[in-house]
Amino acid sequence: MRYLFLLYGAEQLPESGTPEHRKMFEEYTAAVQAMADAGVLISCAPLQPATASTTVRVRDGETLLTDGPAAELKEQFGGYTLVECADLDEALKWAATMPAAAERMVEVRPLVPVEPPA
Amino acid sequence: MARLTGDLEVAEDAVQEACAAALAQWPASGPPANPRAWLIGVARHKALDHVRRESRRAAKEAAAASDGPRQGSLSQARVPEAEADDQLSLIFTCCHPALSLPAQTALTLRAVCGLTTGQIAAGFLVPEPTMGQRLVRAKRKIRQAGIAIRVPGPAELPGRLDAVLRVIYLVFTEGHMTTSGPDLIRGELCEQAIRLARDLNRLLPDQPEAAGLLALLLLTDARRSARVGPDGGLVQLADQDRRQWDAAKISEGRALVEGALAARRPGRYQLQAAIAACHGDAASADETDWPQIVALYNELLRYEPTPVVAANRAAAVAMVDGPEAGLAILTDLAADPAMASWPPLQVAMAELHRRLGQADSALAAYRHALKLGVPAAQQVFIDGRIREILSR
């Protein structure tokens, strides 16, 4: 079964090039490497900040764009991890290894099992 | 059936269809030699039918065949294992921490105890449609989130067992809080909780906390008929007619907690049971081994360092070192606004003021408790105390 980890983090990420940034990078790399080694990792990526988001709505055939994310949250949705696990318990175990879980939180969302068109 | 299909809803439907088939066939043909096996066989067949239908539908709808948990668990469908294992996995699934506590509780009563939605709704004082929704959502989450129907492995077991014990304890206290006359359904919750604890203790003989919980429930339930007076008011432990206590439950509870503590892995339920056993052994409040109870509370605080436990300990300290000593602890606890607005704390303070002959302080605390809101039986008790003080 596939699960999407939605990683929520602090509003302000450490500046690129600082020791804090390097530490964060290393922690995430170690966590996802362990998932890859266990054969559960499908895909993962950090997201650009919410300020880089554009929200699209189509109303009466007209496309409306809004600068910013769909929902204003106190927590920043900062990245995702897609895994394939036997069941929820296994997924929860891996989710707890993501640094975001200790820092803020990780939402574990099951996917409906359908394949995208080839 | 749930373990076979990996889906509580499908399992429930299949069992219902099997029962309907039995109702249609048995009167004419007579019951089969092994009705249980017959029902399971038919239900299994219906469930397989359902899953095949579903996967055909899914295959049409999706570009590729689904490989969700239904198919997954069916292809690995095991030969039905021991019934005990089935029951245990059902309990652990219903009490999965990914479900909310109210959902865990409702689902356990529905799927494990077989209570109807109406009975559970009445037990928890919520409208039946609300309870129905809660059950549907819980079953759906188990399926959609891929919660496996199985007994957790040894590494996870202690944490998961805590969740199960908490659910059973919650079912019991919900029933125990107001076991007055018309609330028969709520008394039924106590019975169900004891049955669950008994099953769990039988299924997990190596877990002293499971034995501790069963002991605690038995020892508490033994006092049920003495807890409520003829006026419907709650009777304090000290004033209860101990001849009304259920001696069989007390001796069973005592034996259980002694056996559990011998394993030297104490926990909150064993310690609470040990405290209840001290009360159960005493012929009166004065003859109670209060120093032993204080010692047990000190130990309990290490496992459950909550102000509620500290408040209960204070009542025992008052019996050993005098009401002033108990009041000093309670006054400290009441500095926390959340605790000050907990009615039992006000009642405990009122009781100690009363014993010290401080009528004004006692009245103020009793009235404060009433203002905060207490169950009907407790209100009758407090009204009685207030009348008694005012008539002096």
Image (cartoon, rainbow, N blue to C red):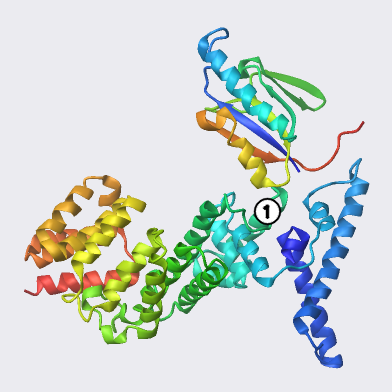
Subunit bearing disc 1? B
Does B338 sit above or below residue A38?
A: below
Examine the image and state in which quarter residue B251 appears: bottom left
Depth check, front residue: A17 or A66: A17
> Which residue is identified by label 1?
B142
- Label 1: few (<14), some (14–19) or many (≥20) C-alpha neighbours in 10 Å: many
Examine the image and state in which quarter residue B265 appears: bottom left
Q: Residue at x 60, y 73 (%)?
A: B115
Depth check, front residue: B27 or B292: B292
Residue B160 can be seen, yes or no:
yes
Does B288 sit above or below residue A83?
A: below
Percent coordinates x, y for residue B248 in the rendering:
39, 85
The disc labelled 1 sits on which kind of residue? Ile
Percent coordinates x, y for residue B279 in the rendering:
27, 74
Residue B236 can be seen, yes or no:
no
Looking at the rendering, in which quadrant would you find the N terminus of chain A? top right
Q: Residue at x 55, y 52 (%)?
A: B100
Percent coordinates x, y for residue B296 in the rendering:
28, 61
Q: Secondary structure at mark 1?
A: helix
Q: As drawn, is B208 to the left or to the right of A97? A: left
Q: As drawn, is B93 to the left or to the right of B317? A: right
Q: Residue at x 59, y 52 (%)?
A: B99
Q: As drawn, is A101 to the left or to the right of B316? A: right
